[in-house]
Amino acid sequence: KAGVTQTPRYLIKTRGQQVTLSCSPISGHRSVSWYQQTPGQGLQFLFEYFSETQRNKGNFPGRFSGRQFSNSRSEMNVSTLELGDSALYLCASSEAAENEKLFFGSGTQLSVL
Amino acid sequence: GESVGLHLPTLSVQEGDNSIINCAYSNSASDYFIWYKQESGKGPQFIIDIRSNMDKRQGQRVTVLLNKTVKHLSLQIAATQPGDSAVYFCAEKGSWGKLQFGAGTQVVVTP
């Protein structure tokens, strides 16, 4: 099976812009979670989707949003980008909704200038 | 061991020796724990997991130990190889229903 695929791999944006990141889970996986990884804060949970419904949300401002499509593919959007949003954004999928044994993609490295 | 914050602990291990990576978790109600390995430029890769009803679980060259009394988790890697150089994360799943990750430990394997 193909692993979790995230696109694009790298992004450079300027403050105030918005960005959309894409994630294709492992075939058959219905749960998708998003994490933000920075050197200072480590891996921080953003949100989790299962069957197109957001099940859990982390402590991030409303500028961070996401959605999941009927084919389990997911997108996350960040509006009004700030310098502090520069990070590696990781998507992970799992078979069931228990949010265990996550399989991660390689991430999208976002740089905000 | 792991700690939350800016500092990433580093474990230096000689090739062929056994490695022990420690992790203190926060929630006594957490019922599932997992270890990941992250190499530079890649996403975290699953190593091994364990439920709270177990004390020990073994995989290929790895063993996870869980001490619920002191809320401590450890990952043992036997016969450490250069390819084991990476950042290792533990994560716990508590009542909030999502995995919460530690800050990670950098493992450096020296020849």
Image (spheres, grey):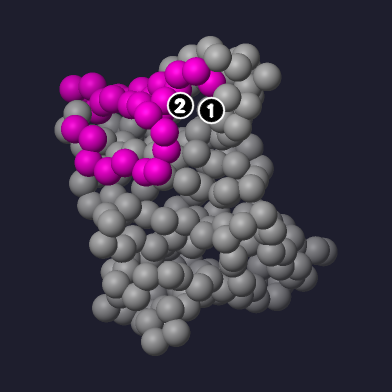
In the image, residue A25 lies at what x, y percent? 33, 32
State which quarter of the image contains the N terminus of chain A: top left
Of the numbered discs 2 and 1, the one sitting upstream in the chain is: 2
Dot 1, crowdedness within 10 Å: few (<14), some or many (≥20)?
many
In the image, residue B63 lies at what x, y percent? 48, 74
**In the displayed structure, would residue A113 be above or below residue A91?**
above
Between the C-alphas of marks 2 and 1, the distance is 7 Å
The stretch drawn in magenta includes residue A67: yes
* Residue range highlighted in magenta: A53-81
Q: Is residue A95 left or right of residue A47?
A: left
Q: Nearer the viewer, residue A17 or B30?
A: A17
User: Taking the image as drawn, is residue A21 in sight?
Assistant: no
Dot 2, crowdedness within 10 Å: few (<14), some or many (≥20)?
many
Q: Nearer the viewer, residue B24 or B18?
A: B24
Identified at 43% across, 70% down, the residue is: B26
State which quarter of the image contains the C terminus of chain A: top right
On the image, numbered disc 2 is attached to which residue? Answer: A6
User: Taking the image as drawn, is residue B2 in sight?
Assistant: yes
Name the secondary structure under disc 1.
Answer: strand
Q: Amino acid at mark 2?
A: Gln
Q: Is residue B86 left or right of residue B52?
A: right
Instruction: Indicate the chain on which mark 1 is placed.
Output: A
Which label was assigned to residue A108?
1
Identified at 64% across, 48% down, the residue is: A40
Identified at 48% across, 66% down, the residue is: B60
Q: Amino acid at mark 1?
A: Thr
- Asked if the residue under mark 1 is in contact with the one under mark 2, i.e. CB atoms within 8 Å, the reply is yes
